[in-house]
Amino acid sequence: DRQFTEEGTRRPFPLSHGTTTLGFIFQGGLIAAADTRASAKGLVSCSSTQKISPIHSHLVVTCSGSGADCMMWRRILTRETRLYQLRHGRCLSIRGTAKLLSFMLHPFKGTEVCDGPKLIYVCSDGARLQGDLFSVGSGSPYAYGVLDREQRWNLSKEEAFSLAREAVFRATHRDAYSGNNVDLFHITDQGWQKKERVDLKEEYYRDIERKANKVEERRKFE
């Protein structure tokens, strides 16, 4: 039982948690987005958690799981990629970084060159999956409902930003462990750029406006 320690004593509270993180590739680069709520069972322990972290100039990671574990892995990964850059004079490739993480951070020398944007999901058991769209966390089924319907290659930047925020908003609407704000990063060949943190209450009002516009458009064709 995960609610008990190895010595058999009960923990102060069950370590249940959840989140909503997502990423997708489009013609303008790569989008990574996540909510900012940290939870411990029914308790909202922090409403402004940073779940997206830059690793180097062209790489960011999103995390889902225990907050302490995520912080530890991010620090180790940042350290190892920085050491690689100092030793070899260039950044470790995205695939190489994913391998480094999946091999439990054992020393690894990446030999691949950068050949475009990469979106890679690394599971806690070391499995690696590369794709054009991923969402991870307790709110991911709800986020996928939006992403699978709306995501396409030829999105404009503003459309991609709006889609990512809407997907996180939809997830937080149904998932109690996700919420508060949405962080968003835009990654291109020039590096990553963090967009302004948006309160999900503002996204709620945008959603009402979107619905009103759709109703108005339908009325025009009637």
Image (tube, helix red, strand yellow):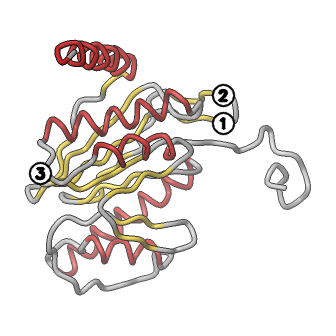
**Residue at (23% x, 74% y) in the render:** 93
**Residue at (20% x, 74% y) in the render:** 86
Q: Is residue 164 above or below residue 44?
A: below
In the rendered image, the quadrant that contains the N terminus is: bottom right
Please identify the quarter of the rendering in which residue 217 is found: top left
Q: Which mark is residue 40?
A: 1
Q: Residues within 10 Å of mark 2 (few under 14, many from 20)?
A: few
**Disc 3 versus disc 1: nearer the observer:** 3
Q: Are marks 1 and 2 in contact (CB under 8 Å)?
A: yes
In the rendered image, the quadrant that contains the C terminus is: top left
Please identify the quarter of the rendering in which residue 116 is found: bottom left
Residue at mark 2: 43
Residue 128 in the figure: left or right of residue 217: right
Residue 129 rendering spot, x and y as whole percentages: 41, 71
Of the numbered discs 3 and 1, the one sitting upstream in the chain is 3
Q: Residues within 10 Å of mark 1 (few under 14, many from 20)?
A: some
Which element type, helix, strand or loop, lies under badge 1?
strand
* Circle 1: residue type: Ala
Q: Which mark is residue 28?
A: 3
Residue 222 in the figure: left or right of residue 138: left
Front residue of this view, candidates 170 and 84 = 170
Front residue of this view, candidates 39 and 213 = 213
Residue 113 rendering spot, x and y as whole percentages: 16, 80
Which element type, helix, strand or loop, lies under badge 2?
strand
Residue 127 rendering spot, x and y as whole percentages: 50, 74
Which element type, helix, strand or loop, lies under badge 3?
loop
